[in-house]
């Protein structure tokens, strides 16, 4: 088992974004907890090159939609899903992972995101209540990867988003190898994972924010464990 890993952080960095402030320390805290030497490269979406991603041990599509290169982000997610590369998505990474799955696994070619695809079938739709800089309780399915990572069945997590899974489609989304494994207290989807992938987990909440209080993000730890 190797003790050095290289991971790609895919997204358009903004110093003002709380999640972007949290991601480097979240990776470092997790790396330290695992006694790993981790190199984390931030890849701006206009610079996406799938041939270069083969050099990385894991990929994280980070918050911050719309991306400067949406098509590139969808290609990264599809590649990670199909190749078995350990994948983590948070906030926008979650939203885009759901759209990619709907398009390329379920065959919903018109699936889209309400923020960027006004004429599409909105798999990702506006939230009834904004979650910009909000916190809330989330629950986890027993035995799921998320529950195993947390060692618990619920957590209080932070958000910065106005969009989430359209409840009209949540049942259809979970008909194959995508599993909904996290919900808020109202039953809205907050996390998904693939059942036949080494590690493919995406959450609407931003677990990386724990690092801003010098706490581990269980999902970042689990993602790095899958990478080495």
Image (tube, rainbow, N blue to C red):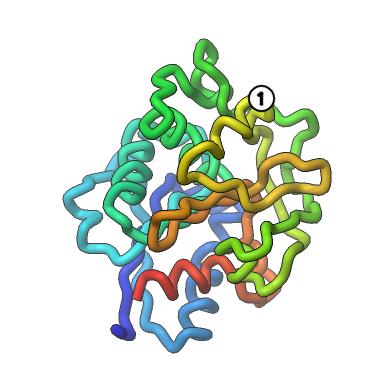
Q: Quadrant of the C terminus?
A: bottom left
Q: Is 87 placed left or right of 19 in the picture?
A: left
Query: In the image, what residue occupies the spot 34% across and 42% down?
Result: 78
Q: Where in the figure is residue 141, as x and y percent of width and height?
A: 67, 57
User: Where 10 sits versus 56, above or below?
Assistant: above
* Residue 214 occupies quadrant: bottom right
Secondary structure under tag 1 reads loop
**Please, which residue is most extreme toward the bottom here?**
35
In the image shown, does 202 or 211 lie closer to the viewer?
202
Q: Where in the figure is residue 140, as x and y percent of width and height?
A: 69, 58
**Please, which residue is most extreme toward the left here?**
51
* Residue 200 occupies quadrant: bottom left
Query: In the image, what residue occupies the spot 32% across and 75% down?
Result: 5
Q: Is residue 7 visible?
A: yes
Query: In the image, what residue occupies the spot 35% across and 62% down?
Result: 58
User: Where 137 sits versus 122, above or below?
Assistant: below
Which residue position holds label 1?
168
């Amino acid at each position: 088992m190797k003790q050095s890993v290289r991971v790609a952080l895919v997204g358009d960095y903004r110093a003002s974004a709380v999640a972007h402030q949290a991601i480097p320390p979240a990776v470092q805290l997790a790396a330290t907890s695992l006694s790993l030497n981790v190199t984390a490269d931030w890849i701006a979406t206009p610079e996406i090159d799938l041939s270069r991603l083969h050099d990385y041990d894991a990929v994280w599509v980070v918050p911050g939609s719309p991306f400067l290169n949406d098509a590139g982000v969808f290609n990264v997610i599809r590649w990670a899903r199909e190749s078995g590369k350990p994948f983590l998505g948070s906030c926008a990474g979650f939203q885009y992972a759901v759209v990619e799955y709907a398009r390329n696994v379920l065959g919903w070619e018109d699936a889209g995101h309400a923020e960027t695809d006004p004429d599409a079938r909105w798999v990702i739709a506006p939230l009834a209540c904004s979650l910009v800089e909000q916190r809330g309780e989330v629950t986890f399915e027993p035995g799921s990867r998320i529950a195993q990572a947390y060692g618990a069945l619920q957590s209080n997590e932070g958000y910065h988003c106005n969009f989430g899974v359209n409840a009209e489609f949540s049942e259809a989304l979970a008909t194959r190898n995508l599993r909904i494994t996290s919900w808020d207290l109202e039953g809205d989807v907050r996390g998904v994972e693939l059942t036949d992938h080494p590690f493919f987990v995406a959450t609407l909440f931003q677990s990386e924010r724990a690092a801003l209080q010098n706490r581990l993000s269980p999902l970042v730890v689990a993602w790095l464990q899958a990478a080495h």
